Structure formats: C-alpha cells, structure tokens
Image: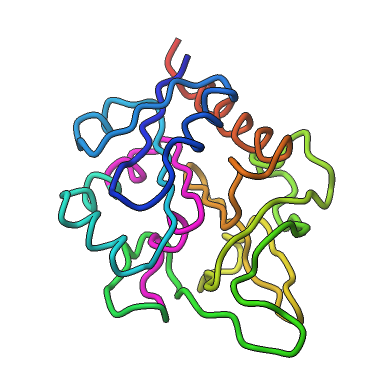
Amino acid sequence: MPVIAVVDYDMGNLHSVCKGLEKAGATPKVTYSAKELEQADAIVLPGVGAFDPAVQHLRSRGLEQPIKDVIASGKPFLGICLGLQILFESSEEGTQPGLGIVRGKVRRFRSEAGITIPHMGWNQLQLTQSKSILWEHLPSQPWVYFVHSYYVDPTEPQVRAATVTHGSQTITAAIAHENLMAVQFHPEKSSNIGLQVLSNFVAQVREKIPA
C-alpha cells in the first residue's frame, strides 16, 4: 500500500482525511518531518482555519521548502481546502505571503442578496479538465461538500480543474497541473464522490511507485 504523508501543522481535522485515505487503499502517515515527507510516496496537505496562522505554522515547522521540494520532484501532491489556498501567492484574508507555488491570489466572496458566506454545504462541480485523473469514474457534474469564505483565483486559468457557482459568482473549485492537485471542497466529507476522488489520487500514486 502506498504511504501518503499527511502534513501536520495544527490546522485541521487530520483524522477524517486519514480515514478517507485508508478507505481509498493507502497508508496515511501524519507527520511534520521533512525527512518523512521525502520518504513518502505522496503528500496530502489538508487544512481548515485562517490563512495567516496556516502559513506561519508551516514556516515555524520548517515545512515550506520541503513542500516545495517534493512538488518540484514530481511526487503526487494533493491540497485540501486551506491546503489549496496556501499554495497561492497571497490572500485577502491576511497579510502573510503564501507559498507562491501557484500564481494568483485568494479572494473573499462578494456579498450579494440571497447567498450565504461562508459557502457551506453541497454544490455541483463543473469539470473544466474532464480528463484529469481526479475525476475518473465520476458523473459529469458531481456533488461535493464545501465550507469556505475565500476562494482561489489563479493567474493562469488553464490550471483550473473544476469550478463551482455560488450566487452569481463562478469560482475555482479545484486545480491540477502535472503532479500538483488541490481541491477547495472536502473529499473526506463528500460521501462516495469524495472517496472516489481520493481513490483516484491513490491510484495515481500507485502508478508512480517503482515496481
């Protein structure tokens, strides 16, 4: 079974992510050790909470460079929720610079009549990279579970793998570029669809492990 390092930086419920990865056929290993990130077959960066504390915790644990290194090495990487947002250059939520691995900014939903912020609950994805490995064996407009007040706005639109519409605003719900994938929704809370997304990620990890 592939060993997937789940990055522990005090930002989020690691238990449900680990359970999801186990169901998807992987061995999750919760860690903040750069060496263990390097040794794992893939990395998952989960996260809930605010942008500034998240990047501060990552930096104080010396994890910024190791995360950049494993992504640059071609190792499969999956960011979840806040773990997507901190890959970007900056956020309207805070003042700290993000990791800057993906060009673009994190923005706050505009208030408008009839919509709630945070965007919370089930919503339908529009798949903009229909051939992405993340979406294999999924229906064309799958329902997934969101909880967020901020969304990513990539400079290069081709990295978008899915969008979602909340009120009049259509925003990026997932990105995928080579070995780097990240989703705004919570696959671990998205029932069978979410489990399939995690299984697709694990299947890709398996393919990359040398025989």
Residue for point 70% across, 53% down: 129
Whether residue 77 is situated above or below residue 95 in the rendered picture: above
- Above or below — where is 93 with respect to 125? below
35 w.r.t. 127: above or below = above
Where's residue 59, x and y in %?
19, 57
Q: Residue at x 45, y 63 (%)?
A: 85
Quadrant in which the C terminus appears: top left
Q: Quadrant of residue 166?
A: bottom right
Residue 154 image position (x, y, % from top left): 52, 70
* Farthest top residue in view: 211
Which residue is more in the foreground, 159 or 33? 33
Q: Over which residues does the magenta segment extend?
A: 69-91
User: Colour scheme used in the picture?
Assistant: rainbow
Relative to residue 30, is residue 150 drawn left or right?
right
Please state the horizontal and vertical placement of residue 105, each as a whole percent of the image.
45, 75
Q: Let me know if residue 84 is in the magenta part.
A: yes
Q: Would residue 106 be found to the left or right of residue 9 on screen?
A: right
